[in-house]
Image: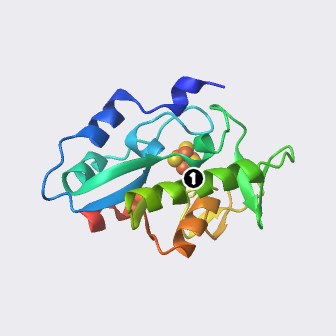
Amino acid sequence: MNAASCKPTASMLYLIKKERTERQVKTILVSRCLLGDPCRYDGTSRPFPGIEALSERYKIVPICPECDGGLPTPRPAGERRGDRIVTKDGADLTDAYRRGAELALKKAKETGAKIALLKSRSPSCGVGRIHDGTFSGGMTEGDGITAELLKANGIALYTENDLSKLL
Ligand code: SF4
């Protein structure tokens, strides 16, 4: 396991610890890979342009359900098939994904976060559309395992494509 990839980076810590202001009235869960953390299955990140502006208005609580659920980085890609998460080779990763989802919900409850900005298309974080389970690049309607659990518990979900709506 590449433990370094499952710890917040210096730039991410800056956003998290930035001095609080009276404009930061809400707390938001944010997918760590969008904040620049190389925690994706292939060890890369997906820093989203302009996402740092969130720290002006929100207290950011970073989550990476796959790391938090105990999976290493890098790790085999998983896709959702019904209620299960499997790899291309057929390994079942569902338990780790569900553990990460429960921990994300726990963080939301502990911090009072009612909003989450999650990485689109991910089998954990995807909102509305995710990979279709065929490992062919196809997409289907549905939520990732974490997104689904957060939504069921009243958390309002956004993806990086909705950033402007939150600012
Ligand atoms: Fe982690 Fe979610 Fe980003 Fe995947 S999409 S790397 S689970 S934060």
Residue indicated by mark 1: 103
Extreme residue in the right direction: 90
State left or right for residue 88 relative to residue 24: right
Considering the image in quadrants, where does the C terminus appear? bottom left
Q: Where is residue 23 in the image (x, y as percent from the top left)?
A: 14, 59
Q: Is residue 82 left or right of residue 1?
A: right
Helix, strand or loop at mark 1? helix
Quick one: quadrant of the N terminus? top right
Type of amino acid under label 1 = Leu
**Total numbered labels placed on residues in the image:** 1
Q: Can residue 120 be seen in this view?
A: no
Which residue is at 64% across, 56% downward? 123
Left or right, residue 81 beside residue 128: right
- Please tell me whether residue 165 is drawn above or below residue 77 in the rendered image: below
Where residue 50 sits in the image (x, y, percent)?
A: 27, 48
User: What residue occupies the far front of the structure in this picture?
Assistant: 110
Q: Is residue 138 visible?
A: yes
Write down the quadrant of residue 112 in the picture. bottom left
Toward which corner of the image does residue 35 lie, by quadrant? Answer: top left
- Label 1, residues with CA under 10 Å away: few <14, some 14-19, many ≥20: some
Residue depicted at 21% across the width and 62% down the height: 25
Report the residue at 53% width, 45% height from top. 64
- Residue 26 against residue 36 in the figure, above or below: below
- Residue located 58% across and 49% down the image: 65
In the rendered image, residue 141, in percent from the top left (x then y), is placed at 63, 72
Q: Where is residue 72 in the image (x, y as percent from the top left)?
A: 66, 33
